[in-house]
Amino acid sequence: MRYRLGLFCLLCLPGCDALWGGMSKNHPDNCVQNRSICGPQETCNEITEVCEPNGGGPGGSLAIDDIQPRRVPSSSQQGQKREITITGRGFLPSATVHLYEREERIDATVVSSTQIVATVPQSSDVCQPVRVRVNNPDGQFATRSDLFGYSIAKPSFFMENFPLNLVGADGLSHPPFLAIADLDNDGGLDVVTAFSAGGRSAVVVIPRIGHGMPPRYFLGQATFTALAVGQLGYGPSPEIVVAYTQGTTGGVFIFRDGQLSSPLSLPTSHPVTGLALADMNRDGRLDLVLSTGSGSTSVLQVYQNQGNGLSKIAMDDVSIDSCPAPSLAAADLDGDGAPDVALACPNGLVVARNDGAGGLSMNTLRWGSSAFSSLAAADFNGDGRMDLALADNTSISIVRFEAGGLVEKAHETVSSTASPIRIEAADINCDLWPDVVYTKSGTDLGVVLNQGKEGWQLTTLVEGMGSGTPRIAVGDFNNDRRPDVLTSYLAESSSPLFRFWNSGS
């Protein structure tokens, strides 16, 4: 993997090269890549990448373990400030917080001995991290720098190709499904991909993509139709859930504890066309939502996680007409605390509301009439409730649940050329507002930047990406605390090619 600062360094203050020039993920003293080299009384400095002592008092009992941004409603996010949560240990009730560089005291509330909420200025320098110092009245202090403080005005991505020779992956007609998770608990993201071609199917785990480790396989003959990864409770690692069709029936394979061996099989009487994982009954365990059907009608089913297996709950079938193979998302859209299920259909958006007991109400809501190809859920306006981003063949809309119905709040035309668009929600420019990353068949990778009250801005990152509409996964693949984008698409030989887009590191 290459680490390059590129255009971002042009915007940095003098000294940027000194801060970043020494970065090397293979350096033996790089604590960002190897946290274990720091002692019990030391903290890893995210900028210098070396271990620093925790405090100045006797015993070193004060320490900062992490700094994270806090999302606050847009009505209170005024001016150039943001809230952060500082976690650690040894915070005294009268502790104070200062900006490390300027010795400027900032507003802070000590919530407990392990948590402080503070307000920091929003830096105009895109290469400036947040660095704070906590002072206890007994003379101890602790410092920490965190890279989440970047605020990138216009994202720029560097590209790495990963042309993996996957068994059975030649002759594909659609880009492989993508999901990401830390399946082996080593602190790095692994990639899960699933595909079907020529009567063959495979689920493949690519450990920490780009690190040279060989893929792991599960080979089958059913046609895979959807993929998700989540913690279902079968072991310490996330489970891989793959939906399939086989003739006039279908089902779900569940690969337990991140392993590709002896999957659980959950058969259904009709082909499975979509799936989502969500805690439908609010018992702390992820449940399984399926869309099934063999024609133009999709039927929603909920399988409740009992802690030792999944069981279909008794509820009336929720049938959605004229909605074959929908894109699904589960999120609390109406603000009652329970996930609802949204479907992107060829004739509009359909929302099945949670009935309060973990099932779904038959009284569905509909919005729009476009042929929607993809959707993603996020709190786009910072009001604490989830919204939906919807993509059709030319544009992306933001839809919100208000006053018992669905209302469009934003609309951006992505392209005048009609072809399906896929989207994912992620904060690409680190300004605490979820953006919408999109791919378009054979053309672009781009992002619609969410600028809060200032609206939305369309930015094309890359043009010309091969055939098929690439699938997207967003995560921090190189542990630099900034979002990266992984895409899967088809090369000229109809073999999958994975492209890793690193956000300016």
Image (cartoon, grey):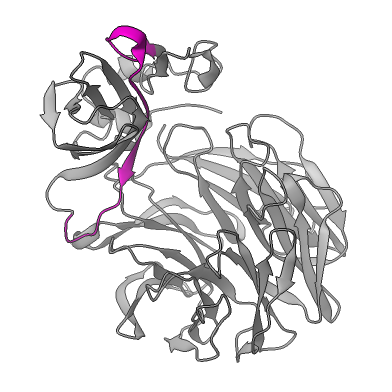
Residue nearest the viewer, comparing 350 with 472: 350
Residue nearest the viewer, comparing 317 with 191: 317
Residue nearest the viewer, comparing 400 with 128: 400
Q: Residue at x 28, y 30 (%)?
A: 127
Relative to 38, is 257 on the left or the right? Answer: right
Residue nearest the viewer, comparing 48 with 390: 48
Q: Position of residue 51 (x, y in %)?
A: 42, 13
Tell me: residue 460, above or below residue 161. Answer: below
Tell me: residue 138, above or below residue 96. Answer: above
Residue range highlighted in magenta: 52-76
Q: Residue at x 55, y 55 (%)?
A: 472
Tell me: residue 364, above or below residue 129. Answer: below
Is residue 365 at all visible to an observer of this figure?
yes
Check if residue 332 falls in the magenta segment: no
Q: Residue at x 50, y 91 (%)?
A: 363
Q: Quadrant of residue 243?
A: bottom right
- Say which quadrant the N terminus sits in: top right
> How many marks overall?
0
Q: Position of residue 336 (x, y in %)?
A: 40, 74
Is residue 167 at all visible to an observer of this figure?
no
Q: Position of residue 426 (x, y in %)?
A: 42, 53
Q: Position of residue 81 (x, y in %)?
A: 17, 44
Check if residue 62 falls in the magenta segment: yes
Relative to 2, is 109 on the left or the right? Answer: left
Q: Quadrant of residue 343?
A: bottom right
- Say which quadrant the C terminus sits in: top left
Tell me: residue 325, above or below residue 129. Answer: below
